[in-house]
Amino acid sequence: MNHIRSQILVCAGTGCTSSSSPAIIAAFQKELEAQKLTEEVKIVQTGCFGLCAMGPVVLVYPEGAFYTHVKADDVKEIVSEHIVKGRIVRRLLHKEGQDAGQTTSLSDTQFYKRQTRIALRNCGVINPESIDEYIGTGGYEALGRALTQQTPQEIIDKVLASGLRGRGGAGFPTGRKWQMTHDAVSPDGVKFVCCNADEGDPGAFMDRSVLEGDPHAVVEAMTIAGYAIGAHQGYIYVRAEYPIAIKRLQIAIDQAREYGILGENIFNSGFNFNLELRLGAGAFVCGEETALMTSIEGKRGEPHPRPPFPANKGLFQRPTLLNNVETYANITWILNEGPEKYAAIGTPKSAGTKVFALGGKITNTGLVEIPMGTPLRTIIEDIGGGCPNGKKFKAAQTGGPSGGCIPASLIDTPMDFDSLGSIGSMIGSGGLIVMDEDNCMVDIAKFFLEFIIDESCGKCSPCRIGTKRLYELLTKITEGEGTMEDLDTIEELCLHLKSSALCGLGQTAPNPVLSTLRYFRDEYIAHVVDKRCPAGVCKKLIHYTIDPAKCKGCTLCARNCPTKAITGAVKAPHTIEQEKCIKCGACMASCRFDAISKH
Amino acid sequence: MPNCKTVVPYAGTKEQEDRLRKVITQHKGQPGATMPVLQAAQEIFGYLPEEVQIMIAEGLDIPLTEVYGVASFYAQFTLNPKGKYRISVCLGTACYVKGASDVLAAVERHLKVAPGSITPDGKFSLDACRCIGACGLAPVMMINNDVYGRLTPDKVADILDKYE
C-alpha cells in the first residue's frame, strides 16, 4: 500500500457541483499527474461540508487548510505551493467577517464551532462512494452487533430510550413507531421498511446532503430497522430531482450487497434483507406517508385517511415502517454511543440534534446541525453571520409551506418541537429561510399558497378549493383591492381548512397565512387601508420615479425599459409614464446615478 | 399549466419503440411497475405522447386511464415535447426571497414565452421549478444539466445568448 502523505478533500455535493467542483477535481488530477504526486497525495471527493455559500470548497490535510471559492485556475498554485512546498495559500483561506483574521482550521470557524454533528457526522469527511471508508469510521458495527448479539426488542428499547423523534416534520417518537410495526401482525408475515427521501420542502436540503455524503448510514439503519420489526424488504423513495443522491445510494446498495451486508444470511445470522430505490416524480404530496406508499405502488400519489396507520396497513396493505432520511442517520450513532448519551443532548422532550437548511437573506447559507433547544439567535447571528448588506433581520420561516414565521421579536425562541409549536410555527423538515426588511410578509404567505395550489393532489375539496379561495383573497390584498372583512374571511377559511382537510398537506397549508397574520397584521393592514406595500414588493402598490435632480439624461433606462415607458431627450431628465410601466425594475437596476427610486 | 394532449405529431422511431418494449418486458408483473416504466419512456422519447402511453398500457396490461392518471399527476412527466434547451428557473423559497421571480420575468421577456411553454423554433422551453437543492447559490436556474447561480435579471440575456 502506498504511503499517502496528504489528502485533498473536494466537496462534491450538489451546491459545490453546481459551482463547478467537478472541474476542480479534474484539475487536481491533472496537476498531480503532471507533478508526479499521484502516489503520495490522494484526492477524495466528499459529501457536503455544509457551507454552501462559500463553495466550491477544498480541504487539505494534514494541515486542515480550508480553501473557499476555489476556481480551477487556483489548483496549480495549491499544488505547487501547498502540496510541494508546504506553504499554505493564504489568499484562498476561508475568511470570517470583514476585518477578522484568517482562520485555517475548519472546526475553528464560527460556522462549525457551535454545531454538534451527529446526522452529518460523515458528510464532508469520508468518500461517500467507498464502503471501506464508511467501515473505517465504525460503519456496519451496529448492524453486526444487532444481528449477532441483540434481540429485535432490545434494539427497539434503545431507540425508545434515546427519545429520538421523527425528523421529517411531525416529530412522532421513532421508537414507538418501531414498536407498533414490530407488534403488528401481517396476514402472510410480510412487512416493509421504507425511507422517505422525497424532500419536497422548497429550501430544505439536509436529506439530500446525507444521501450524497453518507449513504451507507441510511442503508445500515434501514437494515437494522428491518431486523427490529421483522421485514426483509426495504424501499428508499427518493426524488428524481436529486441525481447525485440517487447515484451514490445505488453505489452504496451495490457495495453492501457485494460485501454480504445486504442479501441472504447477513453476517451468518440467518437474517435476509434487500433494498430497492424508487424514484419520485415531482409531487410534494408524496412526502405525506400514505401518499408516498401509494406512489411506490405505482399509482397517483394521493393520500388516504388514517387509520389504518401504515404501521398496521401500509405499503401493499402490509405493516410498514416509514422514517425520514435524517431520522435513519441518527440510528447507528444512537446504537454505537448509547441512547443515554443521545438523550442527554437537546431538551427533555426534544432529544438530540436537528439539521437546519439555512437559506435566504443570510451570509452563511448552508447546513447547520445544532442541539435541539438552541435559540434562533445563535443560528442567525453566530452561525449564520446575520443578514448580508447590513439589512435588518425581519423574520425566519421554518417548516416550509406547512410552517410559520418567527418574527425578530421572538429571536430568542429555543428551536425544539414544542417551543416552535407554541408560537404557531413548526420544525418541519428543517428548512430555515431568513427574511430581511425587503421581504413582504403578505407576498410570502401568497407564495406558499401558490405552491400548495400547485401541489394539492385534488382528492379532498377543502384543500383543492379552500387553498384557491385563500390565494384569491391574498391576491386581492396584494393588489390593493382588499378590505378589512377579507382579513376575517381569511382567518375563518384557514380554520376550516385546518380541521377538514384529508392529510397533513391541507391541514397545515394555512399555517404561513395564520402566522404572518398573527405577527405582521400591521403589514396586512398597510396593504388594505393605506394601499401601500411597506417592503416595496407588491407590484400593484409600488411606483418607480426618476429624480430630475439626479438624472443625467444618459438614456440607459429608456433603452432598457421593455415597454418603452420612459421618455426624455438626451442629457435632459427623463420621466416614467405610469400607465405603461409594468414595474419590472429594469430601469432602477440599470441607472448608474441612483436617480430612480421605488416607493 | 398546459400539460394535456399535445398537438405535435408523434415521431417515435422503431429503435425507440424497441427500447421501450424491452423496458416493459423487464418490469411486467412487478408490483409498482408503472412509474419506473414511465420514467424510462420519458428518458427514451423525451416526453409521453398518447401513442407511448397506449404501448405502456397494453404492454403492462393495465388500463390506459391508469397510465394517463399517473402521467398527468406527477410534475416530472410531460405530455408535451420540451425544447432543445430546457430552462428551469427555481422558485423554491430560498430563491424566491432572493428575487427569483424577477429572474423568471427577465427570461420570459427575453424569450417572449410564458412558463410551461416552448419557443416557436423549439429551441427553448421554459418552466418554473421547485427547489433543485442548490439553495446556497440562490437564485438559480438550470439549462439542461447546467446550473447557473447567484443570478440577477441583468445576467439572463448573456447566459441565454450563449445557447445556439
Image (tube, rainbow, N blue to C red):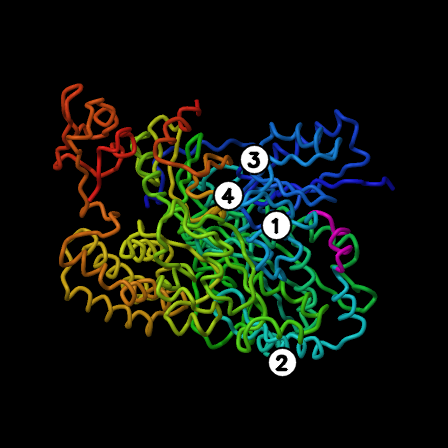
Residue A320 to residue A593: above or below: below
Q: Which residue is mark 3?
A: A20
Q: Are both tags, 2 and 4, on one chain?
A: yes
In magenta, the rendered stretch is A129-138
Task: Indicate which label's residue lies in the foreground, 1 or 2.
Answer: 1
Q: Earlier in the sequence, mark 2 or mark 4?
A: 4
Q: Which residue is mark 1?
A: A212
Residue A584 to residue A431: above or below: above
- Identified at 68% across, 36% down, the residue is A88
Q: CA distance from mark 2 to mark 4?
A: 60 Å
What's the amino acid at mark 3? Ser
Q: Are marks 2 and 4 in contact (CB under 8 Å)?
A: no
Q: CA distance from mark 1 to mark 2?
A: 33 Å
What's the amino acid at mark 1? Glu
Dot 2: element: helix
Task: Indicate which label's residue lies in the foreground, 1 or 4.
Answer: 4
x%, y% of residue B3? 36, 44
Tell me the quadrant of the picture where the C terminus of chain A can be found.
Answer: top left
Q: Are both tags, 4 and 3, on one chain?
A: yes
Q: Earlier in the sequence, mark 1 or mark 4?
A: 4
Q: Which residue is mark 4?
A: A99
Q: Is A370 covered by the magenta stretch? A: no
Q: Which residue is mark 2?
A: A183
Q: Is A133 covered by the magenta stretch? A: yes
Dot 4: element: loop
Seen as rendered, the residue at the extreme top is A570
What's the amino acid at mark 2? Asp
Q: CA distance from mark 3 to mark 1?
A: 16 Å
Residue at mark 2: chain: A
Residue at mark 4: chain: A
